[in-house]
Image (tube, helix red, strand yellow):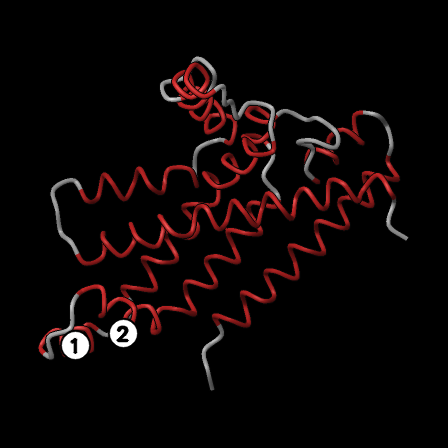
Amino acid sequence: MLDANALPPLLLTLKVATLATALATVPAVALARFAQIRDFPGRDLADAVLTLPMVLPPTVLGYYIIVLLGRRGVFGAYLWETFGVSIMFTWEGAVIAAAVVAFPLVYRSARAAFEGVDGNLENAARTLGATEIAIFFRVSLPLALRGLIAGVMLALARAMGEFGATLMVAGNLPGKTQTLSLAVYSATQAGNDGLANELVLLISVVCVALLVIVAKIVKPKA
């Protein structure tokens, strides 16, 4: 029987991870496609910057988000002074933190998927007069779809386990910003090993299930 204290973090984690993955997917796919078809000065540098959240410590990412979107941040100050909007210590802040962490997983998977598409098929569509948008939706996207879905599922699993950046941006407020990872931390600090074990098992099962799905998606067809 699921502990009643585990339900709110579980529901919040599912909401945050789903929205964060959706928020990261569209720009990640668009930028991956642009980087794949366009050769421009500094492309390697741009590629490294877009992949950076994958290797930076989560606390560093959290600090960057605060610098940009905090109440005294580069953009956050304008939002606060003009609209009275602040993402600090809100579940929306948790979504942004998780999206930043999940972004490179979608981006790298999308790059690999698009690069694996047969360029001859795209060129054939161009000779028939198809626009780049039509080629993307009719040729490139369908052929790269399995790789894209795998990347999205990996990003979802990563967003579910996000801790450091979320803690810095959204805090650890029970019932408001406390995700499963933060709930495990709180339960451990409080000496509630029973709840911690249940939460760890819960998130482990969900993430393993997502990874199994990814494995089935990327498995070559016989």
Q: Name the residue under label 2.
A: 139
Residue 27 spot, x, y in % from top left: 35, 48
Q: Is residue 1 above or below residue 172?
A: below
30 sits left or right of 222 in the view: left
- Characterize the local packing of mark 1: few (<14), some (14-19) or many (20 or more) Cα atoms within 10 angstroms: some
Residue 88 image-quadrant placement:
top right
In the picture as drawn, the residue positioned furthest to the front comes out as 83
Q: How many marks?
A: 2
Residue 146 in which image quadrant: bottom left
Q: In which quarter of the image is residue 77?
A: top left
Identity of the residue drawn at 84% across and 39% down: 5
Residue closest to the far bottom: 222
Q: Residue at x 14, y 79 (%)?
A: 124
**34 w.r.t. 163: above or below:** below
The residue closer to the viewer here, 206 or 86, is 86
For label 2, the SS is: helix
Between the C-alphas of marks 1 and 2, the distance is 8 Å
State whether residue 69 is above or below residue 1. above
What residue did someone put label 1 on? 125
User: What's the mark number on residue 158?
Assistant: none
Residue 69 is left or right of residue 88, and the answer is: left
Secondary structure found at label 1: helix
Q: Where is residue 210 drawn, in percent x and y? A: 61, 60
**Mark 2 is on which residue type?**
Val
Sequence order check, earlier mark of 1 and 2:
1
For image coordinates 16% across by 40% down, the residue present is 42
Q: What residue type is labelled 1?
A: Ala
State the residue in front, 215 or 34.
Answer: 34
Q: Is residue 164 left or right of residue 25?
A: right
**Front position in the image: 85 or 132:** 85
Residue 203 on image: x %, y %: 71, 49
Label 2 near label 1: C-beta < 8 Å? yes
